Image (cartoon, rainbow, N blue to C red):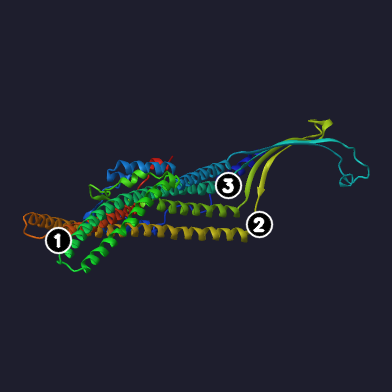
């Protein structure tokens, strides 16, 4: 008759308590919910479309060599290995947190040859010296009446999801940096070829000038002027060659290899990367779901919210159910009724220093506010980066179209003057100058194409592509 009311009272206590602290919900005032963050991008014009960005955006260049380089980098990059290890660490900590909801147990055993203190036993007769032992087993279970453990597991889960996003962020950067280095190698090779054509024409012009000077048809300073221009062009070659070589070193490092393992075959690339379609960029809504740094900031906010509950639970008693059994005494009486012991009952712990507990709650709430501000900042930064990248890319494409038209005009003039030269209607120098103008147009266009590749990769990086949902859950 006594146990039933006690059991009902305990059941009422268990069912009446709830998980303390706020349940996580994304604040309605968060920047990610702003209408202006969800629609199409403002910039881009005719160079971008709202189609979804593919996960492996680099395949839009249709360059198998680039695909292979990025695949190797994603498989062996050292930063990515660190991020993967951090993820595994978070998974292990989450597992450890989950184990706190399980029944806890311990087993102990010890023996010694000892003499107890007579005065400690309030005796004046020396106790005997003999072997004694102590062995026992204890189990306990935390009822977690106020959800402190549950909130801790929730926070650890959010930390693990943030670690997944951090790994994906590294993937995004590794893919973009590999593509950027490869583009630098190819553009440098292309610019070296165009500059070599310019140098060849300048050398030809210098030889013609020497002939004219010998026959008194040109002043001696003309040779100095042309020689200076020739040397100035030659001086640009070492920088371009170094840039191309450094790009190979960067790719080797991105693949986790030492510089001596750099692929010299990359130095043979002579064609800039080219897209065969208008860039698919999606919209703001897709961007905010895709960018790993946004996911990471949002998960950190969720973790901070859960930790408020962890600290709030410290205001309430922690109740555990425990049981123990064992045997302690002289070895001669091992497992006898005189040495056996057992116990069962609740264990209640309650921190009386409320001031300290409330201070920790206030600190957790402040951290939550900071993480919300950081989340808003990451969202605003992401939208700004995409708009700026689109704006820069659109301007670069406009410049490239103008330069392509200028190159077409220069080519037409060069072809016409060459025809006139073959017909003997004009001298060698005007035809040579027209060819030099064509090469100069090629040089300007080559520099523009290099800048366009940089703008494209910066845009892809801002869009946050380069990972897949499947890889995020591995």
Q: Could you tell which of marks 1 and 3 lies nearer the N-terminus?
A: 3
- Residue at the disc numbered 3: 145
Which circle, 2 or 1, is nearer the viewer?
A: 1
Residue 428 sits above or below residue 64 on the image: below
Q: CA distance from mark 2 to mark 3?
A: 18 Å
Question: Which residue is painted at 6% across and 55% down in the image?
Answer: 423
- Is disc 2 in contact with disc 1, using a CB cutoff of under 8 Å? no
Q: Callout 2: helix, strand or loop?
A: loop
Which is nearer the eye, 197 or 173?
A: 197
Quarter of the view holding residue 10: top right
Residue 402 visible? no
1 or 3: mark nearer the eye? 1
Residue 14 in percent (x, y) is at: 58, 44
- Residue 262 % position (x, y): 40, 45
Q: Are marks 2 and 3 in contact (CB under 8 Å)?
A: no
Tell me: residue 160, above or below residue 424. above
**388 to the left or right of 98:** left
- Return the residue nearer the eye: 23 or 209: 209
Q: Quadrant of residue 237?
A: bottom left
Of the residues under marks 2 and 3, which one precedes in the sequence?
Answer: 3
SS class of the residue under badge 1?
Answer: helix
Instruction: Return the mark for residue 447.
Output: none
Give neighbour class at mark 1: few <14, some 14-19, many 20+ (Cα, 10 Å): some
Query: The N terminus appears in which quarter of the rendering?
Result: top right
Report the residue marked by disc 2: 352
Which residue is denoted by mark 1 in the rendering? 429
**Circle nearer the N terminus (2, 1):** 2
Residue 51 appears left or right of 321: left
Q: How many C-alpha atoms fall within 10 Å of the one at disc 3: few (<14), some, or many (≥20)? A: many
């Amino acid at each position: 008759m006594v146990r039933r009311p006690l059991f009902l009272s305990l059941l009422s206590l268990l069912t009446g308590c709830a998980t303390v602290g706020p349940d996580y919900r994304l604040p309605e005032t968060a920047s990610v919910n702003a209408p202006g963050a969800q629609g199409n991008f403002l910039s881009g014009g005719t160079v971008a479309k709202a189609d979804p960005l593919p996960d492996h955006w680099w395949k839009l260049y249709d360059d198998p060599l680039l695909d292979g380089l990025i695949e190797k980098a994603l498989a062996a990059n050292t930063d990515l290995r660190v991020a993967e290890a951090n993820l595994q660490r978070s998974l292990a900590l989450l597992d450890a947190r989950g184990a706190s909801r399980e029944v806890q147990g311990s087993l102990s055993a010890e023996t010694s040859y000892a003499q107890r203190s007579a005065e400690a036993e309030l005796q004046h007769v020396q106790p005997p010296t003999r072997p004694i032992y102590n062995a026992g087993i204890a189990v306990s279970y935390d009822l977690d009446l106020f959800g402190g453990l549950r909130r801790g597991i929730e926070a650890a889960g959010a930390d693990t999801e943030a670690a997944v996003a951090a790994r994906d962020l590294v993937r995004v950067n590794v893919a973009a940096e590999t593509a950027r280095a490869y583009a630098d190698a190819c553009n440098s090779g292309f610019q070296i070829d165009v500059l070599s054509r310019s140098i060849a024409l300048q050398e030809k012009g210098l030889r013609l000038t020497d002939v004219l000077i010998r026959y008194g048809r040109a002043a001696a300073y003309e040779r100095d002027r042309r020689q200076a221009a020739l040397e100035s062009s030659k001086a640009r070659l070492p920088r371009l060659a170094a840039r191309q070589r450094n790009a190979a070193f960067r790719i080797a490092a991105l693949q986790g290899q030492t510089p001596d393992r750099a692929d010299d075959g990359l130095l043979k690339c002579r064609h800039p990367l080219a897209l065969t379609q208008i860039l698919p960029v999606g919209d703001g809504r897709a961007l905010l779901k895709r960018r790993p740094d946004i996911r990471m900031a949002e998960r950190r906010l969720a973790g901070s919210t859960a930790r408020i509950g962890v600290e709030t639970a410290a205001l309430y008693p922690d109740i555990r159910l425990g049981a123990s059994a064992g045997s302690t005494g002289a070895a001669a009486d091992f497992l006898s009724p005189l040495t056996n012991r057992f116990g069962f009952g609740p264990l209640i712990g309650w921190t009386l220093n409320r001031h300290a507990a409330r201070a920790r709650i206030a600190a957790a709430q402040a951290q939550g506010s900071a993480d919300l501000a950081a989340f808003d900042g990451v969202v605003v930064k992401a939208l700004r980066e995409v708009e700026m990248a689109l704006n820069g890319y659109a301007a670069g494409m406009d410049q490239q179209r103008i330069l392509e038209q200028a190159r077409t005009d220069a080519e037409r003039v060069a072809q016409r003057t060459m025809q006139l030269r073959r017909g003997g209607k004009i001298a060698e120098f005007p035809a040579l100058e027209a060819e030099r103008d064509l090469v100069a147009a090629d040089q300007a266009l080559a520099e523009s194409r290099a800048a366009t590749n940089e703008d494209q990769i910066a845009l892809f990086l801002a869009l946050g592509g380069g990972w897949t949902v499947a890889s995020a859950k591995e």
